[in-house]
Structure formats: C-alpha cells, structure tokens
Amino acid sequence: MSITRRDFMATTAIASGVGAAALQPSAALAAETNSKGMPMRNLGKTGAKVTILAFGCGSRFLAYKDEDEADRVLNMVIDLGIGYLDTAQGYGNGHSETRVGRIMKTRRKEVFLTTKIQERKGDAAMKRFEESLRLLNTDHVDLVHVHALSGEDDLAAIEAPDGVLKTVYKIRDQKMARFIGITCHAYPDVLAKALERHDFNCTQMALNAALAGMNLPAGRGSFYRWPKGGFQETALPVANRKGMGVIAMKVYGQDHLKGEATPEELVRYSLSLPVSAAVVGMPKISQIEENVQIAKSFKPFDANRMRQLSGDLSNRKKVAMDRFFANHVDA
C-alpha cells in the first residue's frame, strides 16, 4: 500500500491539539503485510511488528459455547492472517486462556500473544500470571497488561510498594513477557498519568469514533464528562510521544455503535489513528471474515472524514457509552 506524505499528515493531524510531529509515523500506517496479506505495523519502539487486526478473546469469544467450535474459530482466525490474540485471566476466570492454550500447543510461534493481570497485590499477581502461562501452554507471553485501570485510587494501588507494577517489571526482567502495558476503559486522565510516570512498553485504550471515555462519576446519577476527545485527546498523545505500542479497543463500542455506522467505517476510524493495532471481539464467523477483509483492504480516512464521523457519533452516542463503560470490564 502506497501512502503519500500528504496522506500521512492529514491522517495524523486528527488528534486535536497535537501536532503531527508529536505522533509516531511507524505506528500510524502499515508498511508491509504478513504472509497471509494482513497489514502489519510497528509496536511503538519495541522493535516488534503486529497485525493491525487483533482477535479479542473476551466475552465475544466466549459467546462460542461449543469447545470444538471455539478451537475451529481460533485456528481459522490464525489461518486468515490475524496474528495477535488478546486474552486475560479475567475472561471467564481462565476459560478464555484455556481455549487459547489448546491452540498454542501447536501454533504459539504464529501469534503475538497478550494476556492481562487483574490482581493489584504483587504476590497474588505473580501467582495468577504463572497460572496464565500454564493455561496458555507457553513459557512466556509477548505482552502482559495491568488490566482495567479504574481511577486514581486504583492507580495508587498499582503503584504501591507491594503493588502489581513491580511485579510486571519483574515479569519483563525475567523474560516471562517481552513487553508490559496497561489497559483502561473509562479514565483517560488517569491513564495519561500512568503512562507519563512509568516504563510501560504498550497501552490499550478505548479508541472509537464516538470518542467514548468518561472520567469520574459525579454523584446523583450524573457523570462528569471529560473533554469531548476522551482518550484520543488525553492519553493517546502521551503514548505516542513516549513511543509506546498503542492498541485500540472498543472499536464497536461493545456493539453500541453497530447500526450507527458501518463496520468498515468504525474499523477504519480506529485504524486511522496513530495506533499499532485494533482488538475486536467477533462472536460470529461472518464477522471474522468481514473484519479480516476490512483490515486487509485498509486505507486511512482523511482528517475531514475523521472529524465528520466522530462529530456525528459522539453527539449521538458518547454520553450513553460513557455511562456504560464507567464500570465495564470485558469479562
């Protein structure tokens, strides 16, 4: 895919208040594809490359109830070129990791494997991570995230002397994970602080065309609304400036945006941001095939189309989505 400098500048300029020079060109656009035709991007400054489409192994994957079908789905996902699997200990209390682990027995070298730790105490986090490795049938993952940062108090617990932050550093130092990161659904300002303060390689945040990403409950059933741009204007610029690998999630807004825009528009929007990949839950085989086709034919939106789509969807959907994501973890 050939991308001109003019196209690149238009695409990266959409992050309001952030000059294109502050964004990471290597993360913004695909320069190559894998052997199955799936575009790849640099994972920030880690030196790794990942497919721009990642398969979400949370509630949408657990929607496949039959275990044989789940195995067929994962094998199909890899066969179609998706080389990034995103799971977590909290997805079905190990059920997702168990499913992924069955396939990793024979296909571990074909994928970039990510899991997440929900525990906040360091000792408990290490024990649970070791269990994750056992379930995943591997001696290391490519990326482990601290899962679902949920406010200032939670960040303080993560940073505590006996907190999980020291544990993920240890996990990386001992090469049980190549890279470490942190995810966040609903607190863009707190995520920005975490990224500024600490040595994360990657981060995963809600980046969709409705600009979802509230800050804090305001009491009496109301919500304090963070500036319109949410993560896109608050945490994403920090991650780009520090050269982190950025993974977009909630591309479809946990289905809140389906029917409000086409799947192609929603996926293209998130992938037109300066991110490395977008993780998408796909509970039907038809959706896997559709998203693979969208990713393989990806071309970035220009800045005007980005503003038009996000302006329309955020005006109609942002408040409802912010309420939903306030206490959401895709378990």
Image: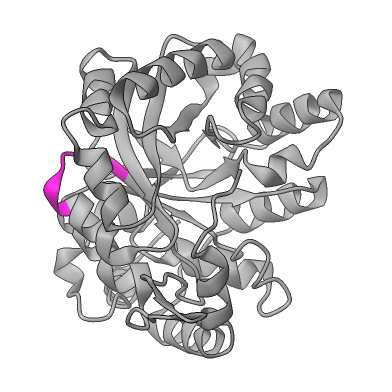
Q: Is residue 215 above or below residue 312?
A: above
Q: In the image, residue 225 lies at what x, y percent?
A: 39, 81
Residue 240 seen: no
Q: Which residues are magenta?
A: 196-202
Viewer-proximal residue among 331 and 316: 331
Viewer-proximal residue among 241 and 29: 241
Residue at left offset 50%, top offset 73%: 322
Quadrant location of residue 263?
A: bottom right
Q: In the image, residue 106 lies at what x, y percent?
A: 63, 10
Q: How many marks?
A: 0
Q: In the image, residue 196 lies at what x, y percent?
A: 14, 53
**Magenta span contains residue 200:** yes
Position of the C terminus by quadrant: top right
**Magenta span contains residue 10:** no
Residue at left offset 52%, top offset 64%: 325
Q: 230 left or right of 20? A: right
Q: 177 left or right of 185? A: left
Q: Is residue 227 above or below residue 164?
A: below
Q: In the image, residue 119 lies at what x, y percent?
A: 40, 32
Q: 43 left or right of 255? A: left
Residue 320 seen: yes
